[in-house]
Amino acid sequence: MIIGLDDELDAILAKGKEKAAEDIIRDVESTYGEVPYVFSFMKDNPDILITKVLYNNSILRSSTLDAKTIELISISVSAAMRCSHCLKLHIRLASDLGVPDDQIAAAVFLAGNIVNASVLATASRQLNEEREVCRICEISSKACDMGVSKV
């Protein structure tokens, strides 16, 4: 259950940031069965950990997406970013929520498709832009008067 922002801030202020950070780590472990690396990395810096969690919770509070959809999106993004730790966590969480393996696989395949399209789009744009530039003066081939053949 995600509490409101005012209640969340009040609890942090009442505990103090060090105690609040310890409680956050304990709550994350209780919720997810582990402490994701990024939270472990932040645990010794309560200001950063607390603001990260406040930000995450604000996004979840404002979302109309259900937990299964959020996990499928998280799987796709984790796969696209090639973050194996995130991917394992979100696959496990999705499975625990009852998301079938075929939907998890579809999320991974969609991520692969988007990454593939991104690579092709970025590379083809760069190729086209390079064709438009004179190799000697590095300005537009159309504006170049150096007589260099237009690639």
Image (spheres, rainbow, N blue to C red):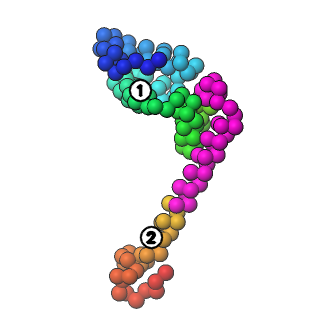
Q: Residues within 10 Å of mark 1 (few under 14, many from 20)?
A: some
Left or right: where 76 falls relative to 19: right
Looking at the image, tell me whether mark 2 or mark 1 is earlier in sequence order: 1
Residue depth check, mark 2 versus mark 1: number of the one nearer the observer: 1
Can residue 9 be seen in this snapshot? Answer: no
Instruction: Kindly identify which residue carries mark 2.
Output: 129
Give the residue displayed 48% in from the left and 24% down from the top: 40
State the residue lying farthest toward the front.
64
Q: Are marks 2 and 1 in contact (CB under 8 Å)?
A: no
- Amino acid bearing label 1: Arg
Left or right: where 104 falls relative to 59: right
Question: Which percent across, then down, holds residue 62?
Answer: 40, 30
Q: Nearer the viewer, residue 63 or 146?
A: 63
Give the prevailing secondary structure in the magenta stretch.
helix
Give the residue displayed 46% in from the left and 83% down from the top: 150
Question: Which percent across, then down, holds residue 144?
Answer: 36, 83
Instruction: Kindly identify which residue carries mark 1.
Output: 61
On screen, 31 above or below 58? Answer: above
Give the residue displayed 40% in from the left and 18% down from the top: 3
Asked if the stretch drawn in magenta spans residue 111, the answer is yes
State the residue lying farthest toward the top.
14
Label 1: which secondary element: helix
Question: Which percent across, then down, holds residue 103?
Answer: 65, 37
Residue 100 quadrant: top right
Q: CA distance from mark 2 to mark 1?
A: 43 Å
Give the residue displayed 64% in from the left and 46% down from the top: 109
In magenta, the rendered stretch is 92-121
Can residue 107 be seen in this snapshot? Answer: yes
